Image (tube, grey):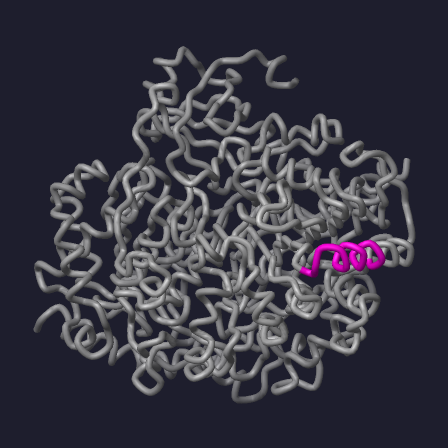
Amino acid sequence: MSIVERKQEKIKGLVKQQKIGMMFGRAIGKRRKNLVDRLLVVVASRLSPPSDPAKSFMRDDICDAEPEFSLEELETYRGQRDG
Amino acid sequence: MAVHDVEAGKAQIRNTVCSSCDISCTVSAKVVDGQVVKVFSSDNPLFRDNICMKGIYAPKGFAHPDRITHPMKRVGERGSGKFEKVSWEEAMGDIASRLKVIVDEHGPEALAVSTSEWNSSTDNGSGRRFMNLLGTPNYISGVALCAGNTAAVNRLVYGWFPQPDYANTECIVLFGHNPKRHSWTPIYNNIRKAQARGAKLIVLDPRKSESAERADIWLPLKVGTDAAMTFGWLKVIIDEELYDKTFVEKWCIGFDELKARVDEFPLSRVAEITGVDEALIAKAARMYAENLSIIPWTPITDQQRNSTSAIRLHASLRAICGNLDVPGGEMLMGLSPDITAANLFELHDVLPQEQKDKQLGADKHPVFTYRAMQKLTEVTEKVWGHPWVNIVMGSFMATPSAVFRAMADGDPYKVKAFFVLSNNALMSYANMKLIYRAMMNQDLIVVHEQFMTPTAQLADYVLPGDAWTERNSLFDAFGWASMTKSSQKAMEPPGECRGVFDFWRDLAHRMGFGNHFPWQTTEDILDERVEKVSGSFQEFAETYDVHIPKMAYKKYEKTGFATPSGKVELYSSILEEFGFDPLPYWREDPAPDPEFPHSLFTGVREDEYFQTGHRHIPELRNRRPEPMLFISPKTAQEEGIVEGEWVSVQSKTGEVRLMTSVRENMPEGLLRVPHGWWKPEEAQGKEHLSGAWAFSDAQVCPDDDDFLDLEQGIPHLKGIPCRVAKITQMEAAE
C-alpha cells in the first residue's frame, strides 16, 4: 500500500469515527443537557480511558494552587485608586 | 440571570471566555458580592486545564487601582499627560462634532481605526459597520502581522483559513512556534495530548525551545528562512512522489509551474540558506508527507520578509499531501450554519467602490486589502454562503505602515482622526517613532481602554473600557471556526466603563446613521446572532459552553474551493493579475551591514504577558519584572556582557534597553528581544510614555521597503540586523 493509499484508508476510518465523535462532542459541549445528551456523556465517559496519561503535564503549581482573592484584599487593592 | 450556586446565597460560578490573550479559553469565574474573586479551569471536559497564569491572576486586573473608570478629556497639549474627567455625554458629543468637521474637510477616509478585538470582545462587527457607513476603508489591526494576514493569504490558495485537527493528527509541525503551559495553553495541551497518543512532533526553530526538546525532529534553521525550508520539503516530497497525485490532478492548478520553481531549490541550496543539514531536511519532509499532518498557524511565519511566499508554501504542502479538509489534517470549517458570525454584520457592501479604492497601502501591498480580497467575494458567497467573509478581521484591512505614513505626512492624503479601541497601537506595529509622529499630527485621537497605556497618553479622549468578565459575548475564533463559545457576564464594570459596541452605536446615532444600529444593547445583537438555535443569548449561554455544528469533510467535492478557479491555486491568478510573482519565491536578505553584525527577532509571547498587557498586575510582574534580552553565551562573551547587565540593542530604526539573560539554547549572533514592554508605574506623558521610549521593541522594528513583505506590506520581525552595547542601570532608567 502506498503512502497516499494508507492515508486515504486512515481518513476513511476517521471520517466514520468522527461522525460518532462529534455527536459526543456536541453533547459534552452543552451545559444544559437533555436525556440523549446525558446518555451520550455517560457512554463517552465509559469509552474514555480511566485515567488521563497526559494529566501530569496539564497542571502545575500555579494552576493547582487556584488562588482566590478575598473581597477585603480586592477592596484594599482597589482602594489605592481612591485613596 | 441563571447562575450555579456553590455557596448558598453567596458565591456564584459564571462560565466565561478569558480574553487575557487571543486564544479565548473557556474558564469559570467565582463571584462573591458582585466581584470576581477567582478564575479557574472550566469543569467541561472539552476545556479542562485550558487556563494559564494570566487568567488565574485576572481578578487583580479587574480590580486594579489604575483602571480608567470615567471618560477623560485632554486638557494640556497633546501628550502632556493632563486629562480631566468628563461625562460620556460631553465626550461623545464633542467626538462626533470634531469627527464631522474632519470628514467635511478631508473626507471620511481621514478617519483611521485600529483595534484588538480579543480585548474588547463586544465589537460584533460594529466597528467596521460604522466605518463602512461613514465611508472610510482605513481599518488596521495587529492581526495584520498575526493570523489575519495568514488568513488572507490562505484564502488566495484555497479560499479559507484551515484549523488543525489535533485530536486525530499523526504529525504536528511547529514553525518557530513554542506553545507552553502558560502561553498558547490549549495548543500546548493539544500537542502534549497528541504526543501522548503517539503523534510525531517536528519543530523548526533557531533556538532549542521547550517544544524542540520534546520534538522527534528539531531543525535549527536560520531565523526568517521558513520559505526556503518549505521549498526544501516540497523538493523532497515532489521528487520522491510522496504527494497525492489524484488530488493534485483533480483539484490543483499550477502544479507543474510550482514543481519548476521548487526545482530551483535543490537541498544543497536550502541547506545553505537555512543552515540545516540536507539529510535532516529530507527526514522531516518525509515524516510530514507520510502522515496525516498539520502545520498549525504561527505568528512566526506571519512576520517575515517572505511571509506571503512562506504561508503559500505551507498551504501548498497541506494541499498536495492530502492533508486539507480531512480528519487528522487541517479543516476548512466555514461559517457556522446556526450562529451568525460577528463579521457578517460589517456591511462591507455599503462602502462605495471609490472609497474602497482609497484604502491605504492597497496600491503597493494589496493582499489583505479590499483590492485583493474583493476578488474572492463572488466565489466565497458560492462556497461559504456570504460574499464579505472576514476571517480573523484579516480581510479588507489597510496596510498599517501606509496608514501611519498618511497620518504623519498626508501622503497620499490626509488622515486626521485616529480611533484606537482596546489596542496599544503606538507599540503594536513596526517603527514606533513613525507612529508617534503620526499620532502627534492628528486633530482627534480617541482611545477606548482599561488603562492609561502609552497610546492613551497621546489621546484627546480616553474612554473607559470594560473587561472580559464584565460583559456578555460570543467567540468563534474571530470567524475562523464554525464552533461558537458563550461567555457570561460575571460582574458589573466599575465606574462608567462600557463595551466598544456601545461606543460605536452611540457614535453612529450622533453621526446620523443610527438607523443602521437598531440594537439598544450588546445583548440585543447577541440575541440576533443566536436566534436560529436559542430564544436569547442568555438561553444560549445557559445551554451551551460551546455550540458545535455538524462537521463535514472534503466539502470542496460538492462546492469547489472559494478561489477564482474553484481549485487550489498553487499558482495564484490574483497575485498574477496584480503583477506579483504568481508562484512562491525566495527573496534574499539585504547585504550584511558591518555596523549591525547581529540579528534580532521579536514578537514572541512571554508566559506572564500578552503583547503590551499585564505589566501592571503584581503577581505577574513579580515573576518577570524587567524586559530580558536572550543571548547565547558565546555572543555575550564576545560583547563583554554578563548575566543581569543592562544593554542597548540598536537597529537602524531605533534602540531598546534590556536586561541580559544568557541562554544556552540561543544560537550565536541571534538576539531575542521581548515584545510589548512598558512600565505602567513610570511617568506618563510624551517625554516618557511610561517607559515605552526605553523598552518598547517597536522602536527597533523597521518598516522600510527592504523589511516589508512585498505582497502584504507587513514587517520583517525575524532577523533584523542589530548591534548590542552595554549601558549602566542609570542609563537604562533614563
Which quadrant, please, contains the C terminus of chain B? top right
Which quadrant, please, contains the N terminus of chain B? bottom right
Q: Main secondary structure of the magenta part?
A: helix
Q: Is residue B101 magenta?
A: yes
Q: Is residue B21 left or right of residue B219?
A: right
Q: In this rendering, does residue B543 appear at all?
A: yes
Residue B370 image offset from top left, x and y in percent: 51, 65
Q: Is residue B103 magenta?
A: yes
Q: Is residue B165 left or right of residue B73?
A: left
Residue name at image x 51 percent, y 73 percent: B389
Residue B673 image offset from top left, x and y in percent: 47, 32
Residue B587 image offset from top left, x and y in percent: 29, 44
The picture quadrant where one finds residue B574 is bottom left
Residue name at image x 63 percent, y 41 percent: B408
User: Can you say whether B24 is above or below B519 in the image?
Assistant: above
User: Can you say whether A21 is above or below B180 in the image?
Assistant: below
The one nearer the camera, B102 or B373, is B102
The picture quadrant where one finds residue B570 is bottom left
Residue B80 image offset from top left, x and y in percent: 80, 32
Q: In this rendering, does residue B545 appear at all?
A: no
Query: Magenta part of the protein: which range?
Result: B96-108
Residue name at image x 72 percent, y 51 percent: B417
The one nearer the camera, A78 or B118, is B118
Q: Is residue B308 left or right of residue B644?
A: left
